[in-house]
Image (cartoon, rainbow, N blue to C red):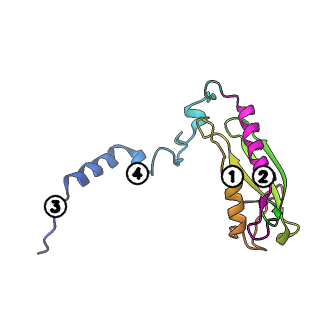
């Protein structure tokens, strides 16, 4: 005869909750479940998402994109030689712009790399969360520079271009 330890009371309570609440078994409220449920559809659950009081979405998007563009445009001094260098070595920033309607507005950075000629790259940064609250993108330029410097890009020949011909990273 094999001795089997009784299940702790907490495990019994969780099992009962799993049976009673189907969202717990499916992985949470945000996962879209089969069968056409409304889980994860904020546009249906909260049909009228509005910006916080005093926030103009267009002005916020323009200010954030302007800040990213200003950081990318500034140079930096090389610590060894003292020469002025671009913010991201080997990258040419083509444009920084806001695109999309509130709350799905994004800051779009398009750039090219000298080592990957002929391949246009881009990065999208959400400017508002799903509920419409502003999301600052203070470190967008720094994280882009780190990703390029560390080679966090798809390898040549394995980069997948979007419908617009841009490799989105």
Residue with the mark numbered 1: 140
User: Pointer 3 and pointer 1: residues touching (CB < 8 Å)?
Assistant: no
* Nearest to the observer: residue 128 or residue 33: 128
Q: Which residue is mark 2?
A: 109
- In 3D space, how far apart are the residues under numbered discs 3 and 1 (Cα atoms)? 52 Å
In 3D space, how far apart are the residues under numbered discs 4 and 1 (Cα atoms)?
Answer: 36 Å
25, 85: nearer the viewer = 85
- The numbered mark, 3 or 1, whose residue comes first in the sequence reads 3
What kind of element bears circle 1? helix
Give the spatial CA distance, label 3 vs label 2.
58 Å
Determine contact: label 1, label 2, CB under 8 Å. Answer: yes
Residue picked out by circle 3:
6
Which mark sits nearer the N-terminus, 2 or 4? 4
Q: CA distance from mark 1 to mark 2?
A: 10 Å
Q: Which residues are magenta?
A: 55-81
Mark 4, residue position: 25
**What crowding class fits label 2: few (fewer than 14 Cα within 10 Å), some (14-19), or many (20 or more)?**
many
The CA distance from mark 4 to mark 3 is 23 Å
Q: Earlier in the sequence, mark 3 or mark 2?
A: 3
Residue 92's quadrant in the figure? Answer: bottom right
């Amino acid at each position: 005869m094999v001795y089997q330890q009784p299940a702790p009371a907490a495990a019994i309570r969780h099992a009962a909750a799993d049976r009673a609440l189907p969202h717990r078994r499916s992985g949470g409220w945000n996962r879209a479940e089969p069968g056409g449920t409304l889980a994860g559809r904020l546009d249906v659950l909260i049909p009228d998402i509005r910006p916080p009081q005093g926030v103009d979405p267009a002005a916020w998007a323009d200010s954030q994109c302007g800040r990213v563009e200003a950081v990318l445009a500034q140079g930096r001094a090389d610590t060894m030689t003292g020469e002025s260098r671009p913010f991201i070595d080997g990258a040419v920033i083509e444009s920084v712009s806001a695109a999309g309607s509130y709350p799905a507005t994004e800051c779009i950075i398009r750039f090219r790399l000298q080592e990957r000629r002929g391949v246009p790259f881009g990065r999208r940064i959400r400017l508002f969360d799903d509920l419409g609250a502003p999301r600052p993108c203070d470190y967008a330029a720094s994280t882009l520079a780190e990703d390029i410097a560390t080679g966090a890009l798809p390898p040549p020949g394995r980069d997948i271009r979007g419908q617009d011909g841009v490799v989105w990273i």
